Every structure is written in C-alpha cells, then in structure tokens.
Image (cartoon, helix red, strand yellow):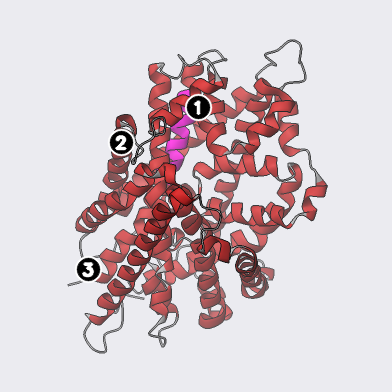
Amino acid sequence: MRLEREHWGSRLGVILAVAGSAVGLGNFLRFPVQAAKNGGGAFIIPYLIALLLVGIPLCWVEWTAGRYGGGFGHSTGPGVFQSLWKKNRFIKYFGITAIFGPLLIYMYYIYIESWCLSYSWYSLTGQLASISDNQGFVNFLTSYQGLDTPSFLAFSSAGLIFFVLTFATNLGVAYYGIRGGIERLCHIAMPLLFFFGLVLAVRVITLFAPDPAHPDWNSINGLGFLWNPDFSALKSAKVWLAAAGQIFFTLSVGMGAIMAYSSYVKKNEDIALSALTSASTNEFAEVIVGGSIIIPAAFIFFGPDQIVGLAESGAFNLGFVTMPQIFNKIPVGAIFGFMWFFMLFLAGITSSISLAQPVIAFLEDEFNVSRQKAVKIFAAVSFVLCLPAVVFIHRGVLDDLDFWGANFFIVVGATLEIVLLAWVFGIDRAWDEMHQGARLKVPRIFKFIIKYVTPTFLLAILGYWFFTDWWSLITMKDVPSENIPYILGIRLLLLGLLLLFVFLVWKAWHKREPGQSPGKEAER
C-alpha cells in the first residue's frame, strides 16, 4: 500500500521554504567577500548576467521538473529523471546527483551552522564581550574547533554539544514533515531572519566613525568600498566564474533541494511566479541585506587600509572574528551580536533541512516507508557521515567536501537537469508544463535561453574546470602530505556512498512488479 503523499499547506509556505533553502550562510558571509574581492560594484555585472542566464532559468527548470515528477509520486532525482525520460532505464542513475550532492553539503554544513548557534549563545551570555582583541577572537574560534592543541582528532566538548543540538533540531523539524515541520519553521524563521537582518543593516548604516581622526571611516564610504566598480576586474575570467559560482551557491540550484520541494506542489499551482518570487527573496537577502552589514561595518572600524586584508582573509574570519570585535565596540553590542549570529543560524537551518529532504524523500517514495522511519534512518546514517568534518577539520576534510558538494556536483546536477528537461523531455512540453496554472507568462526569450544559452554556459564551466584543474585535484597536488591519507579516506567514503545509492536505486526499481511503472499509483 502506497503512503498518502504530502502537500504544502499554502503557496506562501512553499515560497518561504524554497527561499529558506536558498537564503543561507553564503548570503551574509560569502557574497560580500566575493564582491569585495572581485571588482566591487563591477562584480554585480557578471553576477546579474549569471542570474538571468543561469540562476533564474535553472530555478524554473527545477520547479517544473519537480512538480512534474511529483505527479508520478517522485520527489528526488532518480524518480524525476525517470519520469522525464520513461524509455531510458539508465537515466534514473544519473538522478543520483540530486541526492548525493545535497548529502555531501549536509555532511559539513550542519557543523558550520552549529557555530552560529553557539556564538549567538556566547553573545547573550557575555563570553564574547570579555575578549578584547583580534588574536583573542582567533584563539577563541580555534579553541572552539579543537585546533588549539595538536592531536589526531580536533574537537572541543562545547563544539560537540552545539553540533548535537543543531543536528537534533534539524531532524526534529524534518520528523514532522513538509507541512507540520518545514513549512511551520519557515513561517517563523524567514520573517525573523529578515527582521534581524534589516535591524542590523540599519544599525550599521547609522554608525558614526569611531575615530575622530578618520571621519571618512563611515558607512557611506564603507558601502562605496563594496559597490564602487573596478571595471578592470571584468577582464578576468576568474571574476566571471566567481559570479556564476555565487549564483549557484546562493540559489541552491543543481542540488536537488528545489526539485524535492516543488514535487509537493499541486498540479495547477503557479510555479512560474513562485520560482521568481523565491529567487527574488533570496536576492534581496543577499544583495541588499547581506551587502549592507559585514563589509561596511568592517570598513567603519578598521578603515580602508585593513579592509582589503580582512576581505581576503575569508568569510569565516570576517563573520566569527571581525564581527564580534565590532559588536564589542558599540552600545548593547551583545544584543546585536546575538541578532547577527542567530540570523546566520536561521539562514543555516532553513537551508540544511532542505539538504536533508532529498534523501528522506527518496526513502519515502521509492521504499514506501513512513516519514518518521525515513527520518530515523537518515539521522543514524548522516550523524556518522557528519563526524569527519567535525573531528578532521584540521586535515582539510571540510574543504574537500565543500568542493565536491558545493562546486562540482551542483554544476553536474544542473547540467543534467536542464539537458534532460529542455532536450529530451522537450522544450515545448517543458514550456507548457511550466505554465500549467500560471498567471505569470515567462518571456519567450527564456525559452531560447533555457534550451541553448544555459546548457552552453554550464558545459563551458565544466569544460574550463576539466581543462585547468581536474588533474591536480584528483592527484591531490596541492594537499599537504600529512593530510593526504585523510583526504583519500574521505574520497573513498564518498565513492562507497555513491555506489550505495546506485544499489539503492537499482533495488527500488527492481522490487517493483514486472511491468509496473515507477510511481504508477500517483495521480497525474
């Protein structure tokens, strides 16, 4: 007997959930750093081009493919791909990228998310306020991560406690399902996230220069540092690739999360407008809110000479070392510090539950198990899979997982999705499916973009990577010799995990009665 399929409680609910999947740590940490390092305001030019030619088209593709597959009882890549190309019995295996990719990101994202929860607590309790200088905050972070004393494993008791709390919170939300868990969380988390973000942005913009000798260290010049264009940067291919990479990262396209969420949308709901609305919500969070906090605040307190070095030091250093110093220098800074880190935590958890959903949905759809049982299985397996990023962070394991999950597999997954929908399923059928129940008419130019421009763009990115970096990456050329066994170990683990998914997909389809099509019980 096939279990009854869930649906979203409201259109606003699914928009908030998909926006929550997209609005993550990268909006407030990664984007400002990328913009500051890649031409400032000039970065927005390739960024917007990538948004129009890759980001938004892929959003429409994933919403369309997801809803179509959901009509056949599938929420994840294997089933959705098989629904789009019914005559090809191998295509379902390519859909594994939409389960495997998000799980890779989940394996380390949860740990980083737990830092945000812990730092929000440390802000409220005054532990961050007691630290007086930059080195003190560096030492605090390294101690929290367990990096202050050399050992085989790197962890601290506090780090493990907050990791377990974060992990349990994620699985608790997932346990109660699409409507009772994910949608309910996003109805609360997303408005609160935007409220905290806007309060912080206003506070930064209204800050006065703390040093009377440098009245030009102000929020206007801080915004100018971020947004004044350096058009010479546009000559660099790396700037264009960075912009495209940020679009992938920020919109969560190619991961399978949007596909999974949209599979629970009813047949006649307007996915064209919903996709555009959720993408626009994410862009507002990233460009307007995210661009108004971290870089302008750092400029005000550290000036133009140090801001370049701070931006190049990376998103984590800015977020967890520089920002706490700033909050310590302003009135009621503990409250603003709490708002900053809890905003990051909310952005993180709305994203991480979307990363868990594809695996959970795969167990539900293809093995016909209950939501609660699927979550329990996922919890037991994923907890073990998350541990290498926690205890081997000093061996580069987290960075390696980040590359494969957030860079390689999402581009491969996005390429497969758009080629399958636009070329195999057919752009005309896809266009009709996209507009089923739609009140928004997508401009016809995007029909051409989806079929020709976006796939070409994606294939060019993959080709560039294979031409320039693949051999050095595979051979671990730039990995310190002492870290090679750990990186090799995690890659063997990922290979084993990939083969396990191949077996599970084969098992799921093999167990069906001869002649029974996947998802036959679902109404279309």
Q: Which residue is mark 1?
A: 138
Residues marked 1 and 3 touching at CB (< 8 Å): no
Quadrant of the drawing holding the N terminus? bottom left
Mark 1 to mark 3 CA distance (whole Å): 48 Å
Does residue 498 appear anywhere in the picture?
yes
Secondary structure beneath label 1: helix
Residue 368 - label: 3
Part of the protein shown in magenta: 337-350
Image coords of residue 479 (percent x, y): 51, 52
In front: 54, or 431?
54
State the residue at coordinates (24%, 65%): 4
Say whether disc 3 or disc 2 marks the residue closer to the N-terminus.
2
**Comparing labels 1 and 3, the label whose residue is closer to the camera:** 1
Mark 3 to mark 2 CA distance (whole Å): 34 Å
State the residue at coordinates (41%, 30%): 148
Residue type, mark 1 in image: Val
Q: Is residue 255 magenta?
A: no
Residue type, mark 3 in image: Asn
Main SS of the magenta part reads helix
| Local crowd size for mark 1, using a 10 Å CA cut-off: few (<14), some (14–19), many (≥20) | some
Residue 160 - label: 2
Secondary structure beneath label 3: loop
In front: 154, or 357?
154
- Residue 300, quarter of the rendered image: top right
- Residue 284, quarter of the rendered image: top right
Does residue 277 appear anywhere in the picture?
no
| Local crowd size for mark 3, using a 10 Å CA cut-off: few (<14), some (14–19), many (≥20) | some
State the residue at coordinates (51%, 77%): 420
**How many numbered marks are there?**
3
Mark 1 to mark 2 CA distance (whole Å): 19 Å
**Is residue 57 rendered to the left or right of residue 389?**
right
| Local crowd size for mark 2, using a 10 Å CA cut-off: few (<14), some (14–19), many (≥20) | some
